[in-house]
Image (cartoon, grey):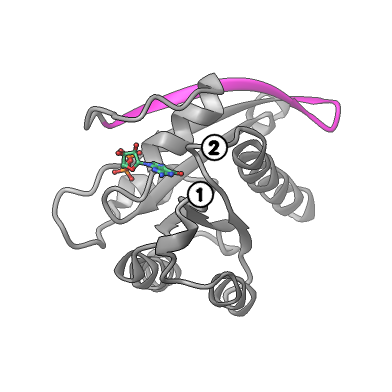
């Protein structure tokens, strides 16, 4: 029903330390704190996007080990959309995104593919960049995902765009069904 349609569940995935919590906190509070505890939780924010009120629920997942990539069935079932985060200064975190994509595509039992936005974070650390913007963009294009490079440390606006873009993709998908 209508009630359900105004809720969007967003799951954040990615290697450790790429900035998943920083992005979540930035989106929720407009702030960047710097250090975050390893608490896995679901947060909510009610927002108005294109004139429509929408409740965005965010599951900021924490990877149990050094190695990605695990996604629980519960997470797959829960998520309406996913944000896959890597750190532009860490090539292995970029590989993780590809692994995660493959895992999601293989394991999802939903009728249509879940919308995904790929995010290259820590754009402010440009002197340490190991993954070019082009590579990120190309991966997103190939995998039919949205793509953004952002800095959770520097700006709120770019982070806001990520969440809103994904919420839009989720709602577009629902409208087609
Ligand atoms: P998570 O493990 O993916 O949730 O990563 P965190 O959000 O805990 O961030 C890991 C570390 O990276 C923390 O020390 C953050 O302060 C730092 N960090 C997160 N985002 C950025 C960013 O955009 N730029 C910089 N320079 N540091 C960041």
Distance from disc 2 to disc 1, alpha carbons, whole Å, reads 7 Å
Q: Quadrant of the C terminus?
A: bottom right
Q: Along the line of sight, which residue is nearer the eye, 147 or 132?
A: 132
Residue drawn at 49 percent across, 59 percent down: 126
| Residue that mark 2 sits on | 154
Q: Are marks 2 and 1 in contact (CB under 8 Å)?
A: yes
Q: Position of residue 176 (x, y in %)?
A: 78, 55
**Which structural element holds mark 2?**
loop
Residue 6: image quadrant is top right
Q: Which residue is mark 1?
A: 124
Q: Is residue 105 left or right of residue 167?
A: left
Q: Is the residue indicated by label 1 positioned so its CB lies within 8 Å of ligand 1?
A: yes
The stretch of residues the image draws in magenta is 40-53
In what element is the residue under mark 1? Answer: loop
The reply to whether the residue tagged 2 has its Cβ within 8 angstroms of ligand 1 is: yes
The one nearer the camera, 3 or 26, is 26
Specify whether residue 41 is painted magenta. Answer: yes
Q: How many C-alpha atoms fall within 10 Å of the one at disc 2: few (<14), some, or many (≥20)?
A: some
Predominant SS of the magenta segment: strand
């Amino acid at each position: 029903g209508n009630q359900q349609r105004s809720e969007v569940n967003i799951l954040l995935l990615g290697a450790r330390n790429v900035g998943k919590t920083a992005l979540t906190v930035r989106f929720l509070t407009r702030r960047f704190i710097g250090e975050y505890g390893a608490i896995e939780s679901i947060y909510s924010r009610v927002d108005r996007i294109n004139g429509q009120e929408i409740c965005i629920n965010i599951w900021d997942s924490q990877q149990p080990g050094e190695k990605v990539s695990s996604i629980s069935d519960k997470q797959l079932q829960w998520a309406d959309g996913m944000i896959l985060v890597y750190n532009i200064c860490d090539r292995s975190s970029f590989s993780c995104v590809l692994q995660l994509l493959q895992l999601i595509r293989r394991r999802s039992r939903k009728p249509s593919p879940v919308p995904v936005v790929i995010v290259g974070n820590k754009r402010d650390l440009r002197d340490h960049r190991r993954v070019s913007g082009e590579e990120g963009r190309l991966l997103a294009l190939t995998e039919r995902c949205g793509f953004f490079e952002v800095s959770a440390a520097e700006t709120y606006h770019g982070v806001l765009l990520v969440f809103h873009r994904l919420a839009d993709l989720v709602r577009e998908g629902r409208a087609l069904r």
